[in-house]
Image: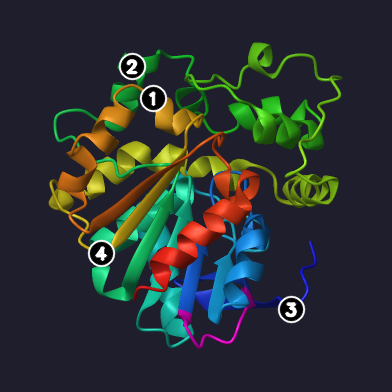
Amino acid sequence: MALDGVTHRTLEVNGIKIHVGEIGNGAAGTVLLLHGFLELWCSWHHQLRFLSERGYRCLAPDLRGYGDSAAPISPSSYSAFHIVGDLVGLLDALSLPQVFVVGQGWGALLAWNLCMFRPERVRALVNMSVAFMPRNPSVKPLELFRRLYGDGYYLLRLQEHGVMEAEFAQMDTKFIFKKLLTTRDTGAISLSKEWWGPMDEDIPLPPWVSQDYVGHLAAKFDQTGFSGAMNFYRCLDLNWELTAPWTAAKVTVPTKFMAGESAMSYNYTGVQEYIHKGGLKGDVPGLEEVVVIAGGAHYIHLEKAEEVNEHIYDFLKKF
């Protein structure tokens, strides 16, 4: 997906190759943008244009396992430490001691980890869709999700390597992305055959999703497959084990959090209470603002791009 003004480079960091799209002169600082599950660097196309026009240098990598970045075969190579290591390596390779960070979905989870592990590298954080999840020392994540949502929850269904990849291979890749981008489900989805529905369904795209964007995602994932993306989920229990030293650790970086009012991750059991009644602020003492985007679902950086762009800029320009 070609975007005017964006240059591309592939850097050798943390033992693997990481592709990054880059735009902007950096007079106002540098912003590192971290994409979510089944997205790519270009999922930030609205933010790249908007922020670069306001003096920011924007770096949008394909996370490991995605797009034009390397995809190690072993699922255990996708822990939070591997990926935060990639990000720190990227900043070091570009001689950037500190940056602004913007995260969405899985990218937000990684941004929370980056701020816990290496807070001195983050000037300020804007995270979207997925709130901080404090480590529960008494139960592993997969067991907790099993108790809450049952074995049919997609996150549990994709734990066995190759199973969901085979299911995805039976579907048209454009159909997969049209369905995921446009769903308004707020419950714990299964990504089962029943959830996908008729595969010959012509899913109309809303104005905020272009055929070009869907086509680019589909072409790139046809080339790479889905294992790299799914391997992030296959490290949830491993992350729990490895982050024991960070139990009860706080995120002290100045932070703004945004979520779409209809996003699944905002409507999960207990999440809204945690966000709005002091839990999030307790775990993230640096939290300064919480914004709920009316009419927005999971992909607010695409669906409500103008509003989200202004929210990002209003926060970053304070620093």
Task: Name the foreground residue: 279 vs 241.
Answer: 279
The correct choice, above or below, for 25 with respect to 258 in the image is below
Pointer 1 with pointer 3, Cβ within 8 A: no
Mark 4, Cα crowd under 10 Å, few <14 / some 14-19 / many 20+, is many
Residue labelled with disc 4: 253
Residue labelled with disc 2: 148
What kind of residue is marked 1? Tyr
Q: Secondary structure at mark 2?
A: helix
Pointer 1 with pointer 2, Cβ within 8 A: yes
Q: Earlier in the sequence, mark 1 or mark 4?
A: 4
Q: Magenta residues?
A: 22-29
Magenta segment: does it hold 269? no
Mark 2, Cα crowd under 10 Å, few <14 / some 14-19 / many 20+, is few
Q: Earlier in the sequence, mark 2 or mark 4?
A: 2
Mark 1, Cα crowd under 10 Å, few <14 / some 14-19 / many 20+, is some
Residue labelled with disc 3: 5
Instruction: Report x, y in % for residue 150.
Output: 40, 13
What kind of residue is marked 3? Gly
Would residue 122 appear left or right of 74 to someone viewing this image? left
What kind of residue is marked 4? Val
